[in-house]
């Protein structure tokens, strides 16, 4: 398989059909009622989504008459768009409704993708699902857009549609000989399997992603795959392998990659799992200021609460746990795991009743959200707390893991200090970024 070029052979690859459009628009309506959206933008996005769906489903010859009964109003976008982050996308959608037969497919894709990424940044997960689906439907042969839709569905907890989009991304990547998107599909599907507590299925995909990227000399893709393997190994209790993957990730992932704060978090998560609580707490306090999406921030806060418990910082634990409890109500899919972190922190402080409360809350939250991994962890944790089993002790200075984990934490802290943010060079508008 070559890199982003057509194959010399005429192999025909099977491409699975795309999943149906999202059927539950009630969740979208509820989400667009959030204060961050506002009435005017909510109405515009709903109208736009309906228009893009009609346009994507219509044949080329039918598009000219799609919105024929609608009067032309060149001033329709209105002053509230100007200077708004979504103004380029909204301008394209305005053109779509006025001249649907003349609009370029790539323009529609860019606009839908912009809305989907904006929605993800603001944890509007159903909005991201709907507009990433719209982008993938507008250009059904682009594997990058199938991957975008797969990741949006995964983050929203729609695992079945996420798997279907991943399988389609595999087929499209093979058919177009697009190695980068082939790697990305393996990496993202591995991450989905981890969330579903299917470690046996996750590892082959993540190893394939890393091996293929390394063989093709794709540094950033290899770094992304090793980053996922770091998370896999930590959750599986393979701490020596996690240290190895952490070193490889730091070596391969560019400094200013958008996931640099997430990498710092995952190294801190590894640290708390070996008992290096002080080092983890210092790094997590820096990370929490760099991750702004609330469904991701709650995860950081849960681990920060655990680290504070390990260092005996009662005030720090109370602050972190209170924020976790609040955010978990709104973002239960990631909040369930964060509540497990709060339970661990309370256990380390030997506040057994509070620990049991958080563990049971994590269990209830995870079951309601379908967070399989969090349910398994919360179940085990509740049993350990009931038996008054102590948490992971502070790492001993003679432990052979002490030196390498400290070195990794220090490297992550220095990278985070130098990191300029996810958009310092600007995002490519013609294809989705890696996570």
Image (cartoon, rainbow, N blue to C red):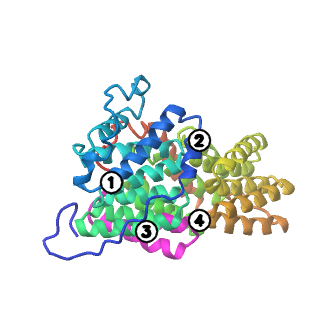
Q: Which residue is mark 2?
A: 288
| Residue 322 place in picture, x, y as percent | 74, 43
> What is the distance, in whole Å, between disc 2 and disc 3 at their CAs?
33 Å
| Residue 377 place in picture, x, y as percent | 68, 66
| Residue 132 place in picture, x, y as percent | 41, 52
Q: Secondary structure at mark 4?
A: helix
**Pointer 4 or 2: first along the chain:** 4
Please give the label number shown on residue 164. 3
**Pointer 1 or 2: first along the chain:** 1
Q: Nearer the viewer, mark 1 or mark 4?
A: 1
Seen at 39% across and 38% down, the residue is 423
In the picture, measured across the screen, residue 407 lies left or right of residue 341, that is left
| Residue 421 place in picture, x, y as percent | 43, 38
Q: Which residue is mark 4?
A: 235
Q: Which residues are magenta?
A: 190-219
> What is the distance, in whole Å, between disc 1 and disc 3 at their CAs?
19 Å
Q: Nearer the viewer, mark 2 or mark 3?
A: 3
Please give the label number shown on residue 56. 1
The residue lying toward the viewer, choosing from 53 and 240, is 53
Counting other residues with Cα less than 10 Å from the Cα at mark 2, is it few (<14), some (14-19), or many (20 or more)? some
Q: Is residue 145 above or below residue 33?
A: below
> What is the distance, in whole Å, between disc 4 and disc 2 at their CAs?
21 Å
State which quarter of the image contains the N terminus.
bottom left
In the picture, measured across the screen, residue 409 lies left or right of residue 253, that is right
């Amino acid at each position: 398989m070559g890199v982003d070029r057509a194959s010399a052979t005429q192999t025909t690859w099977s491409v699975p059909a795309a999943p149906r459009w999202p059927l539950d628009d009630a969740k979208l309506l509820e989400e667009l009622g959030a204060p961050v959206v506002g009435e005017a933008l909510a109405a515009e996005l709903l109208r736009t989504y309906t228009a893009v769906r009609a346009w994507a489903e219509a044949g080329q010859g039918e598009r000219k008459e799609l919105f024929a009964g609608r009067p032309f109003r060149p001033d329709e976008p209105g002053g509230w768009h100007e200077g708004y982050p979504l103004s380029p996308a909204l301008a394209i959608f305005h053109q779509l409704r006025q001249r649907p037969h003349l609009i370029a497919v790539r323009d529609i894709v860019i606009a839908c993708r912009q809305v989907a990424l904006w929605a993800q940044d603001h944890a509007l997960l159903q909005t991201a699902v709907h507009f990433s689906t719209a982008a993938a439907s507008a250009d059904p042969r682009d594997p990058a857009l199938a991957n975008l839709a797969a990741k949006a569905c995964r983050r929203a907890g729609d695992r079945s549609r996420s798997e279907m989009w991943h399988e389609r991304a595999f087929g499209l990547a093979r058919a177009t000989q697009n190695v980068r998107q082939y790697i990305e599909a393996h990496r993202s599907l591995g991450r989905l399997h981890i969330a579903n507590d299917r470690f046996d299925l996750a590892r082959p995909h993540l190893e394939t992603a890393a091996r293929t990227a390394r063989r093709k000399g794709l540094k950033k893709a290899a770094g992304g795959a090793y980053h996922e393997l770091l998370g896999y190994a930590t959750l599986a209790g393979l701490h020596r392998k996690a240290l190895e993957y952490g070193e490889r990730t730091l070596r391969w992932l560019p400094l200013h990659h958008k996931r640099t704060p997430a990498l710092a978090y995952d190294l801190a998560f590894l640290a708390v799992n070996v008992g290096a609580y002080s080092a983890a707490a210092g790094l997590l306090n820096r990370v929490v200021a760099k991750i702004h999406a609330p469904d991701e921030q709650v995860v950081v806060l849960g681990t920060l609460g655990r680290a504070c418990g390990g260092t005996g910082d009662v005030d720090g634990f109370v602050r972190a746990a209170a924020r976790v409890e609040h955010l978990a109500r709104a973002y239960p899919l990631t909040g369930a795991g964060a509540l497990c972190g709060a339970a661990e922190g309370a256990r380390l402080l030997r506040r057994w009743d509070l620990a049991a409360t958080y563990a049971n809350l994590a269990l209830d939250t995870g079951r309601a959200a379908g967070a399989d991994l969090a349910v398994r962890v919360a179940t085990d944790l509740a049993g350990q707390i009931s038996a008054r089993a102590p948490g992971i002790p502070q790492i001993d200075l003679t432990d052979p893991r002490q030196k390498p984990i400290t070195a990794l934490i220090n490297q992550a802290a220095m990278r985070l200090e130098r990191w300029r943010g996810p958009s310092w060079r600007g995002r490519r508008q013609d294809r989705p970024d890696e996570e």
